[in-house]
Amino acid sequence: MNEVTATASTVFLLDVDNTLLDNDRFAADLRTCLTYQFGQAECDRYWSVYEQLRDTVGYADYLGALQHFRLESDARPGLLAMSAWLLNYPFENLLFDDALATIKHLNKLGSAVILSDGDIVLQPYKVESAGIYGALGGRVLIFVHKERSLEAMQARYPADHYVMVDDKPNLLAAMKRVLGDKLTTVFVRQGHYAAKADLASIEPAPDYSIERIGDLPRLADELMRARTESVS
């Protein structure tokens, strides 16, 4: 992976699921495939296993859930089909409109970096197969808990200022409490987490909200102009 070796003026930190990629659509497709292979009851059991595992490890692990799911009966041919389905899913089809164009624009203003959490197999694969890894020149960080890994992030990509873009305002708030004025938080209202978010209960609230990732370039331009004026 390429690294930022000198302190950048601004680093734009981007979440992946429901920020750059439509992960809700992936989950819907996964439900359809599970039901086709195993029936509705077993599909429901997979998601129960998935939720239990997420509560245990703290992140979404679709492959890990399949590993646990197979324990009760590992002789079914559908298990191999599901494994192949997950590992060959066309994640590039899940890119939100203007996602890669947004990354390209941000790289003109500063350095764009993926800051995600997730498993260490499927999550990196999603980023690479969707073309995000290449668009970022390999600037990708994937942690178990990204909001607890801000020291490691800053060591890897030092900057005068950071902008974090995410669909989960509670994570934005957690990061803001750590980095304070060094971080600008941007809530993107995409996906089911964003739809269910109660901003009135989030403290501190996001600095900015946008409806879609394609709205970010204009906001980023405004933020950079404001920062330039403040130091001139």
Image (cartoon, grey):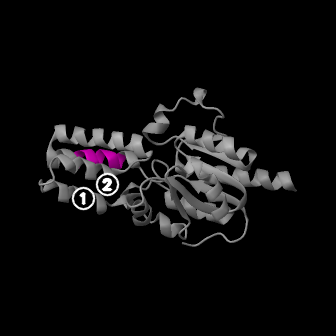
User: Residue reaching furthest right?
Assistant: 232
**How many C-alpha atoms fall within 10 Å of the one at disc 1: few (<14), some, or many (≥20)?**
some
Task: Give the number of the disc on residue 63.
Answer: 2
Q: Is residue 41 visible?
A: yes
Q: Is residue 157 visible?
A: no
The residue range painted magenta reads 25-33
Q: CA distance from mark 1 to mark 2?
A: 8 Å
Quarter location, residue 55:
top left
Where residue 32 appears, as percent x and y from the top left, is: 23, 46
Quarter location, residue 39:
top left
User: Residue reaching furthest top?
Assistant: 200
* 183 and 188: which is toward the camera: 183
Q: Amino acid at mark 1?
A: Ser
Where residue 214 appears, as percent x and y from the top left, is: 54, 51
Circle 1 is placed at which residue position?
83
Q: Amino acid at mark 2?
A: Leu
Residue drawn at (65%, 55%) of the image: 151
Q: Is residue 28 magenta?
A: yes
Q: Quadrant of the C terminus?
A: bottom right
Residue drawn at (52%, 43%) of the image: 167
Where residue 29 appears, as percent x and y from the top left, is: 28, 48
Residue drawn at (47%, 32%) of the image: 196
Where residue 126 appears, as percent x and y from the top left, is: 40, 60
* 64 and 81: which is toward the camera: 64
Give left or right: position of 183 versus 121. right
**How many C-alpha atoms fall within 10 Å of the one at disc 2: few (<14), some, or many (≥20)?**
some
Give left or right: position of 153 versus 212. right
Task: Give the number of the disc on residue 193.
Answer: none
Give left or right: position of 146 versus 92. right
